[in-house]
Amino acid sequence: MSQILIVTGDAGESYEALYAVHRFREEDWRVTVAAPSVRRLHLVMHDFEPGWDTYVERPGYGLEADLSFDQVDVGNYDAILILGGRAPEYLRNNRRLLDIVREFDVQQKWIFAICHGIQVLAAASLTKGKRITCYEHVRFEAEQAGGTFVDQQAVRDGRIVTGQTWQSHPEFYREIFACLAWACPANSVTVGMRQTSM
């Protein structure tokens, strides 16, 4: 059974978390949720309200973390998914997590990130020279770390697939499972559903 490591923490986006867990289980993948510590995580919901210039945050569903970052063995997994919400703003400072993400890259495994999850990839220096997408208000960080922002719901560059927000789930997961099912060439780029060779 293929295995996915899903990364989040307190203030992670609850819809992104539950959707990811259920979607991978639906495809018969073994799902492991990793966080700074093993316990029930406090997730949140980000949404928009009329009259606000940015999103609002409300309490969301909880989720059990299966492993701490210190317990992760990259060799046990086929892919990693970094979720959004507010969690990445502090998870990007976790050196063990950055080492984990870099090791997925070294082992040439799939790396997925959605919404604010790009903050972790940027901190791990994995956006450099890559075409990526993310929530528009963290675009600056990805670009400062050498990425090229593409205003599409989902973008793939090599073994990295990124999505903008939870509203991108259809495009994001369609791209992910197309790559996992048919082993997309690692040297091609997909923007939306259009693929080109590099």
Image (spheres, grey):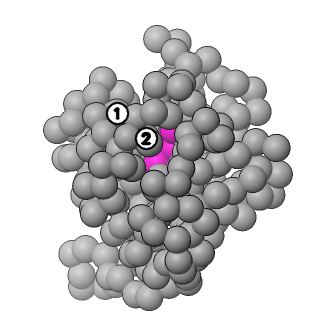
Q: Quadrant of residue 195?
A: top right
| Span colored in magenta | 111-115
Location of residue 115 in the rendering, given as x and y in whole percent from the top left corner: 41, 56
- In this rendering, is residue 131 above or below 186? below
Q: Which residue is mark 2?
A: 101
In the rendered image, which quarter contains the N terminus? top right
Q: Is residue 139 visible?
A: yes
* Three-letter amino acid code of the residue under disc 1: Leu
Q: Nearer the viewer, residue 167 or 6?
A: 6
Contact between marks 1 and 2 (CB within 8 A): the answer is yes
* Three-letter amino acid code of the residue under disc 2: Val
- Lateral position of residue 41 relative to residue 10, left or right: right
Picture disc at residue 126? 1
Tag 2 or tag 1, which sits nearer the N-term?
2
- Which element is circle 2 on? helix
**113 drawn magenta:** yes
**Of the residues tagged 1 and 2, which is closer to the observer?**
2
- In this rendering, is residue 100 above or below 195? below
**46 drawn magenta:** no
